[in-house]
Image (tube, rainbow, N blue to C red):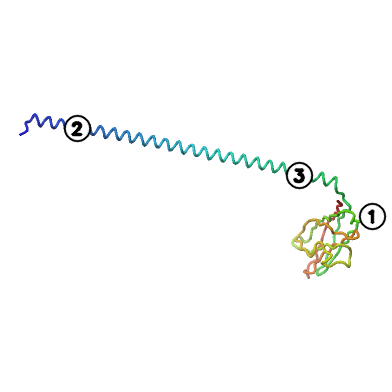
Amino acid sequence: MMTSLQHKDLVTKSSLDANTRATEVLESTKLARASEEYTRQLELKVAAMEEWALASASAKQIAVDRCNELENKLRALNYEDHFQAMSSSASRVLLKETSSLVVGAGMKAKHVVRLDGIEQSSHFDVTLRFKLDISPKDSDIVFSVFRGEGKKQTKDFAVIYNRRINGGGAGEVDNAFEDNTCTIVFCNSHSWIRPRIVKFSIEAIGM
């Protein structure tokens, strides 16, 4: 049989073993917690670096876009200056007119453009520029431009044919003159109630 002394030694040894295991478990827990905290700190640093990288890339892209925008504006300004220089040196205004017409309901009206006192336009290129304003503002007109005068108002002689203009508009067309003349026709035949008032400005530009 086990004596009381032996029993006491066994209890003491078991207690020491238990304390040792508890200490080991505690140390392991501390190490695990330390490892988790270290991992969390690393993850935070990685997230911060990623945010910095994204912000840096975004700032770089904004800078690149801004540079591109400024370069495009500079090219546009240079092109405009070049165009104006070429226009002033290579072109001249042959004719400038401003007038108006009342086009009755269901009617047509025409305006003949003549380059009087100017050498035959076939010797150089002529561009016809126009600007139209129609009253009432919510109305429209059918607009055509024919080479020559009067009797040649057919589609074969048209440089602009039956273009519907709402409220107003502007544009230009080449090869509009024949024998230094072209004819502008305003057609209100689609309206049987309201007349139209057409105010227009015309320029003939020789190149």
Question: Quick one: label 2, few (<14), some, or many (20+) residues within 10 Å?
Answer: few
Q: Secondary structure at mark 3?
A: helix
Q: Report crowding for label 1: few under 14, some 14 to 19, many 20 or more residues within 10 A (C-alpha).
A: few
Q: CA distance from mark 2 to mark 1?
A: 125 Å
| Location of mark 1 (residue) | 117
Residue depicted at x 84% and y 58%:
175
- 58 versus 186 height, above or below: above
Provide residue 163's location: percent of width, then percent of height: 77, 63
Foreground: disc 2 or disc 1:
2
Residue 149 occupies quadrant:
bottom right
Q: Which residue is mark 3?
A: 79
Discs 3, 1 touching: Cβ within 8 Å: no
User: Which residue is denoted by mark 2 in the rendering?
Assistant: 17
Going from N to C along the chain, the mark reached first, 2 or 1, is 2
Please, what is the three-letter code of the amino acid marked with disc 3?
Tyr
Q: Residues within 10 Å of mark 3 (few under 14, many from 20)?
A: few
Quarter of the picture holding the N terminus:
top left
Q: Position of residue 62 (x, y in %)?
A: 60, 41
In the image, what residue type sits under mark 1? Gly
3 or 112: nearer the viewer? 3
Residue 36 numbered tag: none
Label 2 or label 3, whichever comes before in sequence order = 2
Farthest left residue? 1
Q: CA distance from mark 3 to mark 1?
A: 34 Å
**Left or right position of 32 against 124:** left
Residue type marked 2: Asp
Q: For residue 37, which quarter of the picture? A: top left
Q: Position of residue 55 (x, y in %)?
A: 54, 39
Label 2: element kind: helix
Q: Kindly indicate whether the residue at mark 3 contacts the one at mark 2 (C-beta within 8 angstroms).
A: no
